[in-house]
Amino acid sequence: MKHFYLPFEKKEDFSYSHESIEQLTEYEKYQLSFHPERPKHLDYLTVFDEAEECLQNDLHGSCIIQTHRAVLRNGENSWWPVMLIGQQSGPTSDFALMRKLMRNPDEITKWNQGMPTPAAFEKAIKAIELAEQENRIIITVIDTAGADPTEQSEGGGIAWKIGRCMQLLAEATVPTISVIINRGCSGGAIALTGCDVVLAMEYSTYMVISPEACSSILFRTREKANFAAEISQITAKEGLKNGIIDDIIVEHDGPAHHFPESALQSFKSSMVQWIDKLSKIPAAELFSQRMARWEKIGQWDTITEEEITSFEKPVSYFIPKPKKILFVARHKNCIDNAGKKLLDPILYSKLFADNFTCEICGHRYVRLTAHDYIDLVLDKGSFTEHQNTRYIVDRDILNFPDYQKKISEAQQKTGAAASFITGDATIEGHPVVFCATNFNFLGGSFSMSTAEKIWQASKTAIERGVPLVIQATGGGARMHEGCSSMVGLPKLHVAISSVEKAGLPVITIITDPTLGGVAIGIGSRGIKLFEHNAGNIGFSGKRVIEQYTGKPTTKDFQTTWWLQQKGFVERTALPSNMQHAISEILSKYNSENNQQEESL
């Protein structure tokens, strides 16, 4: 079998014309975007000259991100040195060769279903740094079903490595450009799309979650994947409409797998056009222009003070110390290692010392609210909400089923306008800008409004010359906003980098849970303070990993203790001790800052 054909390609009335493709369902367009014969990164490499592989290694999954020095030429007089960081989702676009290679179990393991591992992202990190040293324009090429969802990758720090990729692109001293050539999905894609320009091949797709996974979450079945694809607006055309890509590279003759030479030529023409433009930006203006680009990203609504008053109230889930007794009721369904169900009450002081986590089975009794962290971390009565973020709320740009209803219900439940709140405060007398997240507001999921609030809070921190402290929690980017929520993550990184560039510390409080987009965004930045006995900290969640691998995760997986054993945790504190822990960090910063000023 020399070629592969999708079901719709076999229909008599199908042609490869633009009109014929427009008639496909949204799910069929999604399938088209990762047709096994669409050109891959190494095919597009042929439009460059002097291509030289660098940073090659044999670590598991490393081959899924390929790194090459190269030169892009336009005639005899125009040329630009570049660093290509490309996701190679499989060994080849030659289907006959692919079938032969995939008969070898070692090849199957090597290519890991096209999902980048920590080793792959580490290679990308080194390539970005090398490009800066050699003054090469960075081109990232996106083609991935997502990052590797295994315990091995969590143990290798995949969340922090994805976050590091985004941070380095946010701070790059050379221009950056990203091209989505096929399918760009989830954290595997967003790791390398936070660039100065983001382009997409005409028949590519860009998404926060696959249609199948979206359908499973929404409807408890994968059979509504086409509807999920429709409402998520994942095509390049819709990405351009929603402002999350800058331009489409037209596949003039038809889809790239059928007309590869035409697609490659179109790709090169677009590269020449955009790189010529980017190369003319003075180095001193690069970051400010990057700031101007990302400031425009995202959409949100605003509401009135009267509307906020209708639901605003302080909500606390903190379990107070009993007034007359020493014990509190044990949670239901507490099972010990012997399979015995425990019913006896638990000593409050022990529960408090364990951060409201059952020492027997790991059950978390409560997840604290934003108001709880404001009360625990900040000086009493010092928090004043920012007026420029107070009225920002989530916008339903996709007409996603029941999204507006869920927002309204969450507002009533949490007493907050959105999941994220920002304000001015003090911590043991130290002035700060403080941001907190409500997990009980749609799971604290990262949304476009959150990205904008962090952007505004960062500006306020710089204007006031004070540290930025952010409490992180949440299960990932918000599916209800499609890829637009995920694209807020690079915006967050640019904002936080602007604070650090101003010489101000950023402190991140990592709480239970901090997963997915929240982990690779807020959770990967600044001086990290991990909540004692927290769990569910990483990129892929425990349930996702167990479903994918078919194996249970190990005991204490993704807890603060587990991460500490892996070398990712330096500082921990109980919520009740966080105020003093942060104050010590700020005192050290002030002391070092004063010493530097005196030396001048």
Image: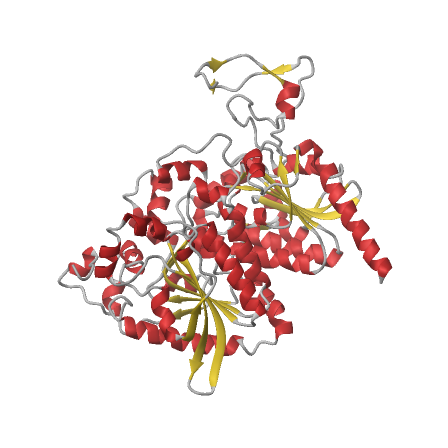
How far across and how far down the image is residue 108, in percent? Answer: 31, 50
Given residues 564 and 266, the one toward you in this image is: 564
How far across and how far down the image is residue 175, in percent? Answer: 54, 70
Outermost residue, bottom direction?
76
Q: Which quadrant of the figure contains the C terminus?
A: bottom right
How far across and how far down the image is residue 487, in percent? Answer: 49, 56
Number of numbered discs on residues = 0
Q: Residue at x 57, y 29 (%)?
A: 366
How far across and how far down the image is residue 273, in percent? Answer: 45, 78
- Residue 469 in view of the camera: yes
On screen, residue 222 versus residue 199, left or right, reads: left
Vertical relation: 1 (above or below) 256: above
Please tell me in which quadrant of the rendered image residue 367 appears: top right
Q: Residue at x 49, y 78 (%)?
A: 80
Q: Residue at x 50, y 38 (%)?
A: 409
Please tell me in which quadrant of the rendered image residue 420 appears: top right
On screen, residue 267 versus residue 425, left or right, reads: left
Q: Which quadrant of the figure contains the N terminus?
A: bottom left
Please tell me in which quadrant of the rendered image residue 584 appears: top right
Q: Residue at x 15, y 63 (%)?
A: 13
Outermost residue, left direction?
12
